[in-house]
Amino acid sequence: MGNGQIFRRATQIYADWSTSELRSYSKVCSMVPQAPDRYTKHQRFDKFREIDEATRPVWAVAVAEVNMMMAAATADHDVHLWDLEVMELKVTLRGHSGQVWEVKFSTNETTLATGSSDATVRLWDTQSGSPLGVLRGHSAAIRCLTFSYAGYLISGDQDSNLFLWEAENACPIKEWKAHEGSVHSVAFSLAEPLMALSVGADGSVASWFVNREDEEVVLGGRFAGGDGGAVLSIASHPVYPGIAAVGNQDGSVWIWNFDPNRRTGKAEVTGHNKLKGHTQAVWFLEFSKDACLLASGSADCTVRVWDATRIEAPTLTAVFKAHESWVKQVRWFTEPGKGRGRARLLVTCSTDGYVSVWAPPGRIKKIRNLEEKSTVKRKLDADESKDSSKNEDSIVPFLGAETEGGGDAGALDASADASVLSAGPLAALGDVPQVPDLPSTALATRPPGPGRPQRSLGQPPVPPAPPAPP
């Protein structure tokens, strides 16, 4: 499928289903990342050639919306770079000697970073596929990567460490112990480019303030990410700092509202919401660019899409079976030229060996207006001003409810293939489980090499952050 057929097919599905409120996402196409379409039997002289079925799991996928490219990492240690305009394999990137667990485009989409179990991060030019460099320093498998709009790159490994990198510096400028056990996911806050969030096997969510000018990384706070057990994924809210969604090993999705404090190193949790529905581990979460939708992919082979326009009361708007095996990652892909939030496609990858593109139902098109001011914050400020003298020790939640797939009249069951689920009743925020803080000696820094310029990955130099108020 090429020459713009993917978008014409998505537009057709979009138009046909725009009047149905009960339709779910529809598959536009599925592809085997290592099998180029131009070698199929209807386009080449070897027209009777057959391509074997997919046998290699796809561990990670990334989408560059502006440059119309997609990167997919397969179990053969290769990364395949696709041209989404013609839906053909552009180049296969080889160099890692172990499994590639994560791929990530830089914010300007000129660089692709790949993290592998061989303990290296490789950088590639996205236009030509040429290698740009190898970042070494980890002693264990690398499981997660994230770029910042300030230009930094953070990588996390199975040995509980995070490394901070910048351009033209092959050595990490900072490294520190972030969790007890493996670091499962890391994400920069889009609303605050110098704050990073990480989750790990110890079940905690940690916030970090990273800046090259600081002597060491500053811990902004740490709190438990769920009811216990490992936290596998995290997604920061694109608009509001201090709001993040996490996916847990028990299948639950938690949305946390917290206030990190770089002076005390403690985060005040001001509210949470628990979203139920997945029956197995939630491997990946991602907010849409306009922050109106949240997608979650799980080991139960399904993808759930939540309406997050009112972040204090998200509702489930679609659920569908995406693959025959674990859904490893879910990425939002907005069709170019259609405006903000109009044609939000989903790209999923799975251990069944396929990458699939999904078109949304018509009702998703109506979800496009994010509240200008967080109702969460307004409620918290109002309640705090009224009841500060009466309830000094209480925590005011923005939503302490557990949103499930059923319960209220008119809501469908959590296992339904497509529905708009209503939120459950509000409940008070209970005691938030706590995790022990890591000792301050766990933080360590490594200065850059002498004479190296202060530049960031794919971005101009960033002025230092203003000092914290006394």
Image (cartoon, rainbow, N blue to C red):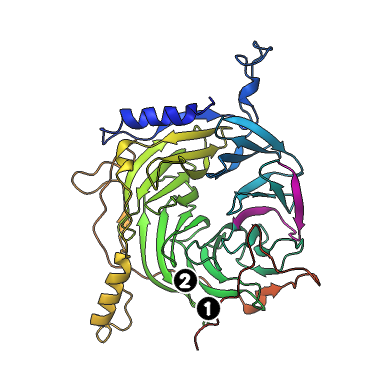
Q: Is 136 part of what is drawn in magenta?
A: yes
**Is residue 19 positioned above or below 310 on the image?**
above
Q: Is residue 443 left or right of residue 396?
A: right
Q: Nearer the viewer, residue 336 or 386?
A: 336
Residue that sits furthest to the right in the current view: 450
SS at badge 1 = loop
The answer to whether residue 43 of the structure is visible from this angle is yes
SS at badge 2 = loop
Q: Amino acid at mark 1?
A: Arg
Q: CA distance from mark 1 to mark 2?
A: 18 Å
Q: Give the percent coordinates (x, y) of residue 177.
A: 65, 68
Q: Residues within 10 Å of mark 1 (few under 14, many from 20)?
A: some
Q: Give the percent coordinates (x, y) of residue 83.
A: 60, 35
Q: Is residue 163 left or right of residue 328?
A: right
**Is residue 126 positioned above or below 108 on the image?**
above
Q: Residues within 10 Å of mark 2 (few under 14, many from 20)?
A: some
Residues shaded magenta: 129-146
Give the mark, 1 or 2, whose residue is nearer the N terminus: 1
Question: What is the number of the mark on residue 434?
Answer: 2
- Identify the residue position indicated by label 1 in the image: 262
Residue that sits furthest to the left in the current view: 409
Q: Is residue 231 left or right of residue 413?
A: right
Q: Nearer the viewer, residue 463 or 445?
A: 463
Q: Is 19 part of what is drawn in magenta?
A: no
Question: What is the number of the mark on residue 392?
Answer: none
